Amino acid sequence: MSNDKEIAKRVAHILKVLAKKIEENPDTLRDLGLILGDIPTVNQKKKKTEEPQIDFDIFQIFAEGGEPALRQKLETLELKTLKGIIRQHGFDTSKLAEKWRKKERLLNLIIERVSARSDKGRVFKEYP
């Protein structure tokens, strides 16, 4: 058991000396046959695709102009932007809409969800 501790101490010392040498002279890596690009990283984060930004509030438009106003505003947007709105607001937790290719289908989903969320709690507002 003490032999294992001695070996561990020696290896740690060797690694410390090697690290110091590499810091002082980075060419040491090349001399050892190591290139930083060859060293695999363990936990590479995926690059997130940038969400398309919209400069209006879909709930505000629905409150002011209703379904026709919201539909008219959304029809000018691209499929990618519509899917971004669905993701941003959590309208499709099952992520089925990610596969949809028809703009009309995405529009209907957004309008349906905005309408449902806007009506939520209305019973308490109308209570005398």
Image: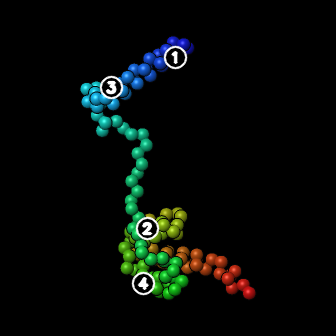
User: Residue 126 at x, y = what percent?
Assistant: 69, 85
The tag earlier along the polypeptide, 2 or 4, is 4
Q: CA distance from mark 2 to mark 4?
A: 18 Å
The answer to whether residue 37 shows anywhere in this view is: yes
For badge 4, the amino acid type reads: Gln
Q: Is residue 20 found left or right of 61 in the rendered image?
A: left
- Judging from the image, what secondary structure is the residue with disc 1 in? helix
Q: Residue at x 58, y 75 (%)?
A: 117
Q: CA distance from mark 4 to mark 1?
A: 74 Å
Q: Residue furthest top?
A: 3
Asked whether the residues under the numbered discs 3 and 2 touch, taking CB atoms below 8 Å apart as contact, a structural biologist would say no
Give the quarter of the figure containing the C terminus. Answer: bottom right
- Judging from the image, what secondary structure is the residue with disc 2 in? helix
User: Residue 7 at x, y = what percent?
Assistant: 47, 16
Q: Which residue is mark 3?
A: 21
Q: Which residue is mark 4?
A: 72
Q: Is residue 53 found left or right of 122 in the rendered image?
A: left
How dense is the environment of label 1, judged by Cα within 10 Å: few (below 14), some, or many (20 and up)? few
How dense is the environment of label 3, judged by Cα within 10 Å: few (below 14), some, or many (20 and up)? some
Asked whether the residues under the numbered discs 2 and 4 touch, taking CB atoms below 8 Å apart as contact, a structural biologist would say no
For badge 2, the amino acid type reads: Gly
For badge 1, the amino acid type reads: Lys
Exactly how many numbered labels are in the figure?
4
The tag earlier along the polypeptide, 4 or 3, is 3
